[in-house]
Image (spheres, rainbow, N blue to C red):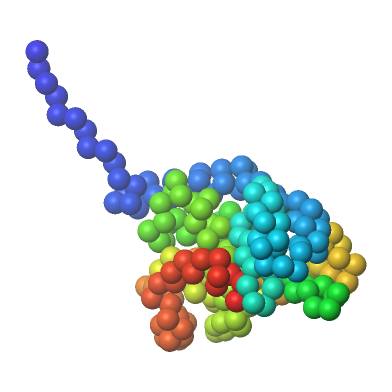
Amino acid sequence: MRCHATDPVLDPLASPALRHRLARGHARALVARAQSADEGAVFAALRALPMGAKGAARALARPARRPGVVRVARGARGTVVVTRQVCDVTVMHEGEAAFTERGLIYTRLAVRQTRGWVHTTALRASFSAHALERLVQRSDTAPETLAEAADAEAAALLRGLARDAVIEARGDAYLAARARGVWAGSVDRTAGDGVWSDEAAEIDVPTFSARTFLAEDEMHPFVWWRWQGAGGERLQDEGAQCAAA
């Protein structure tokens, strides 16, 4: 009986060509399978939160378990929820629509209750399937963990947008990613949603539209310099407490 050597398992991280093929399939599969949040129900739960810390913590556990809810946190400045929606995303470049495809839009709702008033602020971040594909191709993100990576990247993008950490250069906007690199795109405005509140339906929501992911060696020197100055060597997962900052 002759024995044959077993073929080594092909590591996608060591094969750029295979990694590129996997990236496209995983990005599109992620968008196709992703669940959208019921933002009306989530916001209703936020508005009904008890004022006490213990009661609020128990009440927040329910929306945190809903499909499409990415982050829920309560801090000194109020309550923050990050939700996910699947919809058509129009990618802009230099003020012009480049293309439209199915993608993910994440919304960060910050709710603060004071003396019977409920104050709401909203921010958004969007990823086309193309942008998520580039994340896999140009970082060490494993294709099979793309769903978790996309949610974490969105939460980090929204924190950066809330801190006004956008880098502007050559007509584009950049925000540091959790992976080693930056998201390139534009800061746009999208219409508020009436399911949050009547007043929210009238506002324009600042939205970071991620067009692509750039690794360190693909950045323009000025962007790289600003990225380094912002401590962008690698963003760590700051967890729920930072999400509420």
For residue 6, what is the image quadrant?
Answer: top left
Residue 14, x across and y down, in percent = 29, 51
Residue at 43% in and 86% down: 229
The number of numbered discs placed on residues in the rendered structure image is: 0
Q: Is residue 42 left or right of residue 13?
A: right
Which of these two is toward me, 108 or 53?
53
**Considering only vertical position in the picture, is 187 above or below 107?**
below
For residue 57, what is the image quadrant?
Answer: bottom right
Say whether residue 80 is visible: no
Which of these two is toward me, 126 or 148?
148
Q: Quadrant of the N terminus?
A: top left
Q: Give the residue at the far left of this rendering.
A: 1
Which of these two is toward me, 136 or 245?
245
Residue at 84% in and 59% down: 195
Say whether residue 48 is visible: yes
Q: Quadrant of the C terminus?
A: bottom right
Residue at 40% in and 72% down: 234
For residue 216, what is the image quadrant?
Answer: bottom left
Which of these two is toward me, 173 or 196?
196
**Considering only vertical position in the picture, is 1 above or below 113?**
above
Residue 85, x across and y down, in percent = 69, 54
Residue 18, x across and y down, in percent = 37, 46
Residue 92, x across and y down, in percent = 66, 68
Q: Give the residue at the far right of this rendering.
A: 198
Residue at 55% in and 72% down: 242
